[in-house]
């Protein structure tokens, strides 16, 4: 039993890593422009399809990873520049609707170009082997997901807390006006935040495809929504909260499927969003946030 | 002539005028056009009910497809012939399996089911600020689809319910539109509507004048959901089929587009935008099919929305109604 539980923990950690990767970007963007970016999940899709195209073209995997990061950053910077910057200062609802529109444009353009047919997505054979640790086994894919995510998160935390750029980002999130008065190039900082967050989402797409084996143009919708749930669990707008929320959500979802009887496991998505509603009911500012004067 | 009398007269006139138009279309146009017009009426009713929630009360709900799905399943299960129901839907409680309601009570129960779901979701979420509602209602769509897919003893799973008796038609759709428009109009030009708009404009100021803002939001949300579920129930009895994916996020988006382009809170604007967008996507469909570019019309709709947001964020009419109609129905009162 404890072995089974441990197995589930590894699975949950892998799934949670993916959620955390998406949720961090979501949270960064929210923290800076105070907008929910409904198009964030579609970056996951873009990352997955970019990977597929490059692998088909014979690009070696380490380069694929690098390019996916770049493509995600570029796509995110474009969305930030073209759509979000002109809307700064507009009512919040306008911003939601705009990001929803962007998401619909991305999804349907992908549908037009790629068709709705799901495609197979295969990692190299090495990745599909399983490694055994005294009764507990994990696929190399899952271990890669966990490891790579940890690496990405470390890099991100370094940027946000140890560089000038990160300081500028945090200042902008704190107060746009004050940041601008301190001589921070706010517009550039916003675009950079979009780029970094989106790059992480694109990498999540690469890993997502490898873990689940199939991708289609609408695949970003559910991860995008679940990233928001993760953010709510941890407290919207905080990077640490998004991280913890992502891992917790992954674990909770896997444990729900693993520990509940077989016939309810189909209800996992219902479980996740019920969880959201329950948390909004009892701790709307997140499990780890102590007090927020305005629930933004 | 006082306000009430002139309003009753004007409403009666508008309904008779509409009815004559419907009668003309029904007797001259093809079945395809008649069904299309019925769908257009239902879309307009949906858009008007959403403009009540999103426009007047300033909420940002994307939950209409969820409420429509709930309404469609509830009504379809209630009107399904009792004999076939027992064999097809094995998990239904016996007393439901053996009842076979006529359309009207089934529609009402469907509407109430939608309203109850809205009450459940609204209770935790409406106390919070805007975007929580947006995401919670998106989550509700996922929950409803997920339940409809997995609870196959009652819903027949992903295949959906087909062969639902086609009990509604263009007159039912017209009737729903008339009722929704009248209800929305009466709410908008009453103290209730002004309280909703006050809640939207400035929550603190509204509270200070004694308006219970949470209750106002809840009311707008639940009424919107009631009409959405009603429209879903009519849709399934018009088309004959409902699946878990019949009403998806895309529909929520299109309804929001109708509301925004018409002007959030404008009833006439919502009707015009709903008609235009329904006609546009229908007329683009042959092009999509011949070019093989599925999704083209959706991209066009989304891009035009973004343009509207940049260049005319208030939409066609803002929150207002066209002056002529307002005068006609409300006299000199604002």
Image: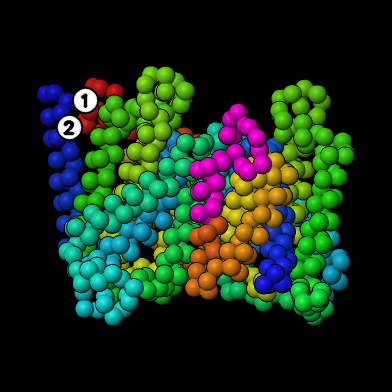
State the image quarter where residue A17 is shown.
bottom right
| Secondary structure at numbered mark 2 | helix
User: In terms of depth relative to the viewer, which is nearer, B295 or B195?
Assistant: B195
Give the letter of the chain under mark 2.
Answer: B
> Magenta includes A285?
yes
Q: Which residue is mark 1?
A: B331
Q: Residue at coordinates 69% horizontally, 55% vertically from top-left?
A: A247
Q: Position of residue B61 (x, y in %)?
A: 45, 45
Is B138 placed left or right of B316 in the picture? right
| Secondary structure at numbered mark 1 | loop
User: In terms of depth relative to the viewer, which is nearer, B333 or B293?
Assistant: B333
Residue A50 visible? The answer is no
Q: Residue at coordinates 69% horizontally, 37% vertically from top-left?
A: A32
The magenta segment is A273-296
- Quadrant (top left, top right, bottom left, bottom right) of the N terminus of chain A: bottom right
Is A132 placed left or right of A79 in the picture? right
2 and 1 marks in contact (CB < 8 Å)? yes
Q: Give the vertical position of A179 relative to B161 (above or below).
A: above
Q: Residue at coordinates 34% horizontally, 73% vertically from top-left?
A: B91
Q: Residue furthest front?
A: A1
Q: Which residue is mark 2?
A: B7
Is A107 placed left or right of B267 in the picture? right
Give the number of marks.
Answer: 2
């Amino acid at each position: 039993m404890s072995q089974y539980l441990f197995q589930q923990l590894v699975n949950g950690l892998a799934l949670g890593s993916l959620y955390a990767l998406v949720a961090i970007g979501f949270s960064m963007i929210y923290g800076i422009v105070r907008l929910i970016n409904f198009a964030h999940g579609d970056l996951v899709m873009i990352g997955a399809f970019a990977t597929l195209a490059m692998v088909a073209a014979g690009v070696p995997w380490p380069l694929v990873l690098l390019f996916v990061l770049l493509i995600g950053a570029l796509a995110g910077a474009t969305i930030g520049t073209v759509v979000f910057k002109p809307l700064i200062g507009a009512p919040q609802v306008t911003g939601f609707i705009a990001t929803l529109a962007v998401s619909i444009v991305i999804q349907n353009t992908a549908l037009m170009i790629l068709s709705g047919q799901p495609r197979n997505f295969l990692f190299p054979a090495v990745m599909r082997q399983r490694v055994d640790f005294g009764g507990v086994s994990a696929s190399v894919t899952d271990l890669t997901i966990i490891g790579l995510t940890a690496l990405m998160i470390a890099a991100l935390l370094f940027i946000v807390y140890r560089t000038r750029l990160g300081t500028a980002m945090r200042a902008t999130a704190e107060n746009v006006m004050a940041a601008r008065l301190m001589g921070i190039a706010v517009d550039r900082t916003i675009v950079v935040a979009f780029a970094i967050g989106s790059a992480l989402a694109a990498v999540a797409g690469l890993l997502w495809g490898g873990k689940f084996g199939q991708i289609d143009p609408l695949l970003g919708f559910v991860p995008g929504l679940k990233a928001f749930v993760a953010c709510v669990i941890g407290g919207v707008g905080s990077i640490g909260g998004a991280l913890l929320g992502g891992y917790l959500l992954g674990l909770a979802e896997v444990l729900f499927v693993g520990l509940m009887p077989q016939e309810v496991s189909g209800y996992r998505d219902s479980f996740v969003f019920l969880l959201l509603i329950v948390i909004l009911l009892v701790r709307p500012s997140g499990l780890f946030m102590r007090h927020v004067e305005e629930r933004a | 002539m006082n306000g009430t009398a002139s309003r009753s007269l004007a409403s009666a006139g508008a309904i008779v005028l509409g009815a004559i138009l419907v009668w003309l279309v029904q007797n001259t146009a093809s079945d395809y056009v008649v069904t299309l017009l019925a769908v257009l009426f239902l879309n307009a009713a949906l858009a008007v009910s959403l403009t009540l929630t999103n426009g007047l009360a300033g909420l940002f709900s994307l939950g209409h497809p969820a409420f429509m799905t709930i309404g469609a399943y509830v009504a379809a299960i209630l009107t399904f012939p009792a004999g076939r129901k027992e064999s097809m839907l094995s998990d239904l409680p016996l007393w439901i399996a053996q009842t076979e309601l006529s359309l009207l009570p089934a529609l009402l129960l469907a509407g109430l089911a939608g309203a109850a779901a809205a009450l459940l979701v609204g209770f935790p979420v409406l106390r919070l600020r805007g975007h929580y509602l947006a995401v919670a209602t998106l989550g509700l769509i996922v929950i409803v689809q997920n339940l409809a897919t997995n609870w196959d003893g009652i819903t027949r799973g992903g295949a959906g319910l087909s062969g639902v008796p086609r009990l509604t038609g263009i007159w039912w759709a017209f009737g729903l539109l008339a009722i929704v428009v009248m209800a929305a109009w009466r709410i908008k030009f009453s103290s209730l509507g002004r309280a909703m708009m006050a809640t939207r404009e400035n929550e603190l100021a509204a509270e200070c004048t004694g308006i219970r803002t949470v209750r106002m939001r809840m009311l707008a949300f639940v009424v919107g959901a009631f009409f959405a579920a009603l429209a879903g129930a009519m849709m399934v009895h018009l088309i004959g089929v409902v699946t878990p994916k019949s009403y998806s996020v895309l529909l929520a988006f299109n309804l929001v587009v109708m509301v925004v382009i018409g002007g959030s809170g404008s009833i006439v604007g919502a009707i015009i935008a709903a008609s235009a967008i329904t006609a546009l996507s229908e007329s683009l469909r042959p092009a999509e099919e011949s070019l093989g570019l599925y999704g083209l019309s959706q991209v066009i709709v989304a891009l035009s929305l973004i343009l509207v947001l940049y260049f005319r964020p208030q939409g066609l009419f803002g929150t207002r109604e066209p002056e002529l109609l307002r005068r006609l129905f409300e006299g000199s009162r604002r």
